[in-house]
Amino acid sequence: MAGGNRFRYGSWRGGPDPLAPPYDVRAAVDSVGSEVLSGGSLREALRNLLRRGPQGRGGLDDLVARARRLRREALRRGDLDGAVTRSRALLDQALAAERDELRGRDDDDARFAEAVLDNLPSSTARAVEELAGYEWVSDEARAAYQQILDGLRRDVLEQRFSGLRDAMQGAAANPAAQRRLAEMLGDLNDLLARHDRGEDTTDAFAEFMRRHGEFFPENPGTVDELVDALARRAAAGERLMRSLSPAQREELSRLMESSLGPELAGQLSALDANLRSLRPDLAWDRRERVRGDQPLGYGEAAGALGEIADLDDLLDQLGQEHPGATLDDIDVESVRRNLGRDAADDVRRLRELERELRRQGWLTRGADGLALSPKALRRLGGTALRRIFAELSTGRQGQHELRSAGAAGEVTGASRPWEYGDEQPLDVVRTLARAVRRGGAGVPVALAVEDFEVVETERRASAAVALCVDLSFSMISEGRWGPMKQTALALSHLMATRFPQDALQIIGFGREAMPLTQQELAGVEPDMVQGTNLQHALMLAGRHLRRHPGAEPVVLVVTDGEPTAHLDPELGGGVFNWPSLPETIQLTVAEVDKLTRYGATMNLFMLGEDPGLRRFVDAMARRCGGRVFTPDLDDLGEYVVSDYLRSRRGRRPNG
């Protein structure tokens, strides 16, 4: 209570919370992550977030649609030849009034004047030129003719200089106003010429604005701001001329020369040349097909074309198509001017969202643009892992393995009786010895279940895991890209959070192979070059395992095609051939043998039903004692993560 007043406090009920942020940063990160986990490009996912906007509203797509609609409306605004059409109407009005006045007179001068009018050219501009020295007898006719000149002069100058409206009122009859205008144009051309030569024009600009600032209500703060404002208008006027037919262009040019006079026309021509030199990037020579029934005056037509040009620039900025494009490239003032204040607010909110994503550490900006930060990748990997653990808890049915064999671990020299589920190698000598002791000597030796012994192995405290993932084009064309990414990110997150002592190397392979960080994997896009170079991938996997000699060596391969490429030392790169060359298969098998001799567990996850791939992976599994899985796409992550966890326990039951 204060001063007898009572205050009551409660929850806000007047609509959306005015103090709440205009976006949910975590929801935005999850939106990007969901698209990446579904197989989308990281670059496209970030772009889509800005295009759709947070919560699917207020994005760049909405602004683009609005700009395109306004552009279509501007293209239907009217007839660009309206200045000539209006001049023709005023000329006809003047000639009709003059003939009416002459008809009432019976002197020779009247007949001569009628002959002059009867022999005027059909061209409006030429007729206006020939009437420049004509002595009008009708006040109404004289006023209509003067309106042609004064009106077009006013339209041209007001289109070029928004502050000239007051200066040009009565300028035709006011020599002082004409001198002020001519002085301003002379000083302006001198200033721009010096600026174009690279001279320091800071003081000259300040003096120019002190003397002529009333002509420029925009109040530019620098020469460049002045040039920007003037050049946009001048370019719109030039586009108007380019958009007319040759005959229309000729008519309007001559009418403008008549209305402006030689001195003023020369100064404007010099101004256009200076502005074009300073801003050559503007669309000076572009033509537009503006149509409509309403005749547009010079200022209206140039204004429509200027609006179209502004919208074109805005569409380019909103499209964010050029390399290195950012929201900072969008001219918010142009958005406000052309699309409205609410559109400008949307751009500011998107900018703030992008800045907040960077400030909170979700995004980083590098030479290639925005990328997910390690913090965002941890959240992304956690999401992928939760999905996989959810699938594990439901125990999906209908999955099968083609073959299982082998085990990993250090041999201790001891053996023990075989138990159901064991995958350790058989101790052949001790197995036969038990059978002989039980059944006596003789050939053949009869084996019973209780005779079998397996070699005991000791699990290592840590694992070195190489996850080789196929990046070939078929992976995305068959919808396998998303599950592959989700699997790799989930495994990476699991090892980083639950088994930090383990060392994971993700290896992507197409025509050639390359190690990938978690960040690179999230942003990697399909290799459009043909080739599946498993040989190179296994070579890199072997290097990774040898860098961790004390760890359990595990190689996991996810692929949907048999090897069709290998490294050629002489060519210094991958060599592709379909069908697979014997050399490709031999070199790939050689890498498999190296990993097997090193003691690595190698399991293969086969996607698809390619017969050639089936034969190859089955042969590899038999050769290296590994296993082959053929999971459904939705189960790939479950299989890979489960196999990794089983490999750490040292017992992998047969499926």
Image (spheres, rainbow, N blue to C red):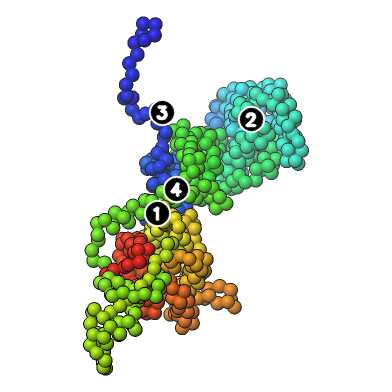
Measured as percent of width and height from the top left, residue 288 is found at 52, 46
Instruction: Give the distance between the C-alpha atoms of the residues marked 3 and 2, in whole angstroms.
Output: 35 Å
Q: Is residue 446 rendered to the left or right of residue 587?
A: left
Measured as percent of width and height from the top left, residue 90 is found at 55, 31
Instruction: Give the distance between the C-alpha atoms of the residues marked 1 and 4, in whole angstroms.
Output: 18 Å
Of the residues tagged 3 and 2, which is closer to the observer? Answer: 3
Of the residues tagged 2 and 1, which is closer to the observer? Answer: 1
Q: Is residue 92 rendered to the left or right of residue 180?
A: left
Of the residues tagged 3 and 1, which is closer to the observer? Answer: 1
497 in relation to 307, above or below: below
Q: Amino acid at mark 2?
A: Pro
Measuring 54% from the left and 38% from the top, which residue is drawn there?
331
Measuring 49% from the left and 49% from the top, which residue is drawn there?
373
CB atoms of marks 1 and 4 within 8 Å: no
Q: Amino acid at mark 4?
A: Ala
Checking the image for residue 19, the label placed there is 3
Measuring 65% from the left and 30% from the top, which residue is drawn there?
221
Of the residues tagged 1 and 4, which is closer to the observer? Answer: 1
> 202 and 525: which one is in front?
525
Instruction: Give the distance between the C-alpha atoms of the residues marked 4 and 2, in whole angstroms.
Output: 44 Å
Q: Amino acid at mark 3?
A: Leu
Circle 4 sits on which residue?
376
SS type, badge 2: loop
Circle 1 sits on which residue?
498
